[in-house]
């Protein structure tokens, strides 16, 4: 995720002493991933001739039960393209107040799409059908036209909170009934799929995918790729998305080397997210038992958010850096830790020990 600048500037330390829990984006491509990238067939994707990109797009479309997909440089771009295709200037987007599309995409909803936003106050990013319905504007020219509803599964700022699929089904049905677009920011949907036991059940993944008109899937978070996100939707939607990607400057040429990393990650880095979830819950337990900490949000996936008794998160981030644990402030009294591919059971054990020893 986009992090605020003043949060945490790490003291330089020997690499072997640093447990980097700032984000699941800090991973380096594995040797096997680099081999896959090296071996990738490529072509000019602006001509639609990159075999690796075509294979990744086809695979993501098939995985989610959608007709088509588009490979893009970032999750911000896939989300922003989706919003642009679903809305017209002056329209309104409904999303949770914790959502990435609202908080961390540079005001892109207004800037790129000229749309306004209606923020819902959900439970760690997960709002209820009734709240959504109550915030759809009437069809009256006084009001902005509500045209898009967006959810984030898992919700980053909600501490990796996982949605209840039944609630998503209700939201989806309501959006279809009202002719509203329904978009998923699935930067970490892989974590949700693993946590709910859906990964490995293709029919459940397609059923989930069918709930949405468009989905943004990130490859560079928990899946460990250096770059890349995929947008999925109908053929018609993706044709329009192509135009937006061009306008935003996201067309790439022989980017099959990047798509090959994504294909490799789909084969090897999804099921293992379970390990990241286990590591996060270990950290959560240690923090929960710690006298300096006021509370820990429920740990559902690979994100741990804890609350301090005072508004001194910048100082605590500094203290953690001194102990060789890199993390981010997530508000004046909150800190976020994220587990990922580059953390072994030993590094997590080491982090737990350091936290246990910490006294403010
Ligand atoms: C990281 C993230 C994105 C997209 O981020 P990029 O850094 O642009 O790839 C979108 N949504 C969520 C929830 C994220 O965590």
Image (spheres, grey):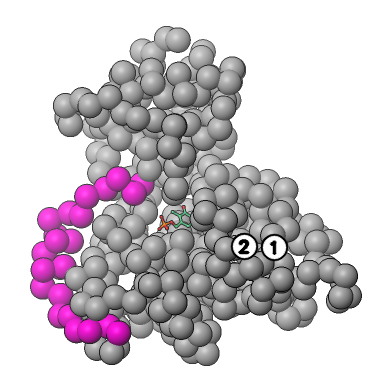
Q: Quadrant of residue 117?
A: bottom right
The reply to whether residue 106 is visible in this rendering is yes
Q: Position of residue 20 (x, y in %)?
A: 30, 35
Image quarter of the C terminus: top left
Task: Please tell me whether mark 1 sits on a helix, a strand or a loop.
Answer: strand
- Identify residue for label 1: 116
* Residues marked 2 and 1 touching at CB (< 8 Å): yes
Residue 91 to residue 120: above or below: below
Q: Which mark is residue 100?
A: none
Task: Please tell me whether mark 2 sits on a helix, a strand or a loop.
Answer: helix
The residue positioned 43% from the left and 82% from the top of the image is: 242
Residue 252 magenta: no
Q: Position of residue 93 (x, y in %)?
A: 68, 65
Residue range in magenta is 24-46
Whether the residue carrying mark 2 lies under 8 Å from ligand 1 is answered with no
- Identify residue for label 2: 110
Q: Nearer the viewer, residue 290 or 175?
A: 175
Q: Position of residue 74 (x, y in %)?
A: 39, 63
């Amino acid at each position: 995720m986009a992090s605020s600048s003043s949060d945490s500037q790490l003291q330089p330390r020997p690499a072997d002493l640093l447990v980097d829990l700032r984000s699941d984006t800090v991973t380096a491509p594995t040797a096997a991933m680099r081999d896959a990238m090296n071996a990738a067939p490529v072509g000019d994707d602006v001509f639609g001739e990159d075999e690796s990109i075509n294979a990744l797009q086809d695979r993501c479309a098939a995985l989610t039960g959608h007709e088509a997909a588009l490979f893009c440089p970032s999750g911000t771009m896939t989300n922003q393209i989706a919003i642009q295709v679903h809305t017209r200037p002056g329209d309104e987007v409904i999303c949770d107040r914790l959502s990435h599309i609202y908080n961390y995409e540079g005001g892109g909803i207004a800037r790129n799409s000229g749309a306004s936003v209606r923020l819902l106050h959900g439970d760690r990013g997960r709002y209820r059908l009734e709240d959504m319905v109550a915030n759809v504007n009437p069809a009256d020219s006084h009001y902005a036209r509500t045209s898009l509803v967006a959810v984030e599964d898992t919700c980053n700022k909600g501490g990796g909170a996982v949605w209840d699929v039944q609630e998503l089904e209700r939201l989806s049905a309501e959006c279809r009934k009202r002719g509203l677009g329904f978009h998923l920011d699935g930067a970490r949907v892989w974590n949700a799929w693993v946590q709910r036991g859906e990964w490995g059940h293709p029919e459940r993944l397609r059923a989930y995918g069918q709930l949405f008109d468009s989905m943004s899937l990130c490859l560079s978070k928990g899946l460990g790729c250096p770059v890349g996100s995929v947008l999925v939707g109908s053929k018609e939607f993706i044709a329009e998305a192509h135009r937006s990607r061009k306008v935003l400057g996201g067309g790439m040429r022989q980017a099959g080397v990047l798509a090959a990393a994504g294909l490799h990650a789909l084969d090897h880095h999804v099921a293992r997210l379970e390990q990241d979830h286990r590591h996060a819950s270990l950290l959560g337990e240690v923090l929960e038992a710690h006298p300096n900490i006021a509370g820990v949000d429920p740990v559902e996936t690979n994100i741990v958010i804890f609350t301090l008794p005072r508004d001194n998160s910048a100082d605590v981030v500094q203290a953690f850096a001194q102990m060789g644990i890199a993390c981010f402030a997530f508000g004046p009294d909150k800190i976020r830790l994220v587990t990922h591919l580059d953390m072994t059971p030993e590094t997590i054990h080491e982090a737990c020990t350091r936290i246990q020893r910490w006294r403010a």
